[in-house]
Amino acid sequence: MRRRNLASVLGLLATVAGSSVGVAANASDAAAERAARIEQVRAVEIAFAKAVMDDKPEAFAALLDEGTVFVSGRTVTRGKTAVVAGWKDFFGPARPYFEWHPEVVELSADGNLGLSRGPWVIRTKDKDGKEIEVKGLYNSVWQRQTDGSWRIVFDAGCGPCPACG
């Protein structure tokens, strides 16, 4: 009888230990997946900025969700078509210098929304040819698509402020 009880206890301990290893492996897999998705969001934000820097409006548009919303000051632009039209002056030979990059990238709990935040700078010239530089911060929210790609669903920037430098 004692042998059977001992065998049952040992079997139970082996089962519990095995499931604990499985839980640890699952946690490790989840952490790796989260880290990979954070890097995906960082990479797509950089590609988004590069599309503007490289004067590629089609690459810019390809990263916009159909229902995207862009907020600039008190102006709200809704929908991919309207955003593309609103950004037309950032493309072409007379475009200003416009650069941004992510400093903070984070994910929602389910890993399907990504936040990218960082500084932006625009340089233009006034009528006398003197360079004008404006800085601010942006926040972009990216949504993971069923194919694993990411599309921007919200973008908001704040203009010059003491925190922006």
Image: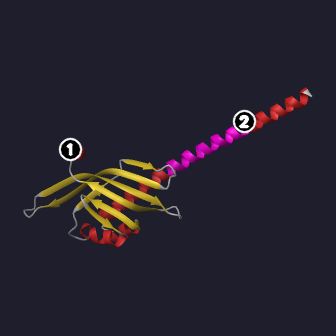
Query: In the image, residue 69 lies at what x, y percent?
Result: 35, 63
Quarter in which the C terminus is drawn: top left
146 sits to left or right of 126 = right
Q: Is residue 19 above or below residue 135?
A: above
Q: Residue at x 19, y 54 (%)?
A: 134
Q: Identify the element where label 1 is drawn.
A: helix
- Visible residue check, residue 54: no
Given residues 119 and 83, the one toward you in this image is 83
Q: Identify the element where label 2 is drawn.
A: helix
Over which residues does the magenta segment extend?
A: 16-36
Query: In the image, residue 81 lies at what x, y percent?
Result: 34, 73
Of the numbered discs in the image, which one, if any, rests on residue 162? 1
Q: Is residue 30 above or below residue 155?
A: above
Q: Residue at x 21, y 63 (%)?
A: 96
The residue under label 2 is 17
Query: In the image, residue 89 lies at what x, y percent?
Result: 24, 69
- Visible residue check, residue 55: yes
Query: In the image, residue 130 lies at what x, y percent?
Result: 10, 58
Dot 1: within a 10 Å radius of its alpha carbon, few (fewer than 14), some, or many (20 or more) residues? few
Residue 87 colored in magenta in the image: no
Give the mark nearest the N terminus, 1 or 2. Answer: 2
Quarter in which the N terminus is drawn: top right
Q: Residue at x 32, y 62 (%)?
A: 70
Q: Say which amino acid is labelled 2.
A: Ala
Q: Quadrant of residue 73?
A: bottom left
Q: Quadrant of residue 9?
A: top right
Q: Are marks 1 and 2 in contact (CB under 8 Å)?
A: no
Q: Is residue 48 above or below residue 22?
A: below
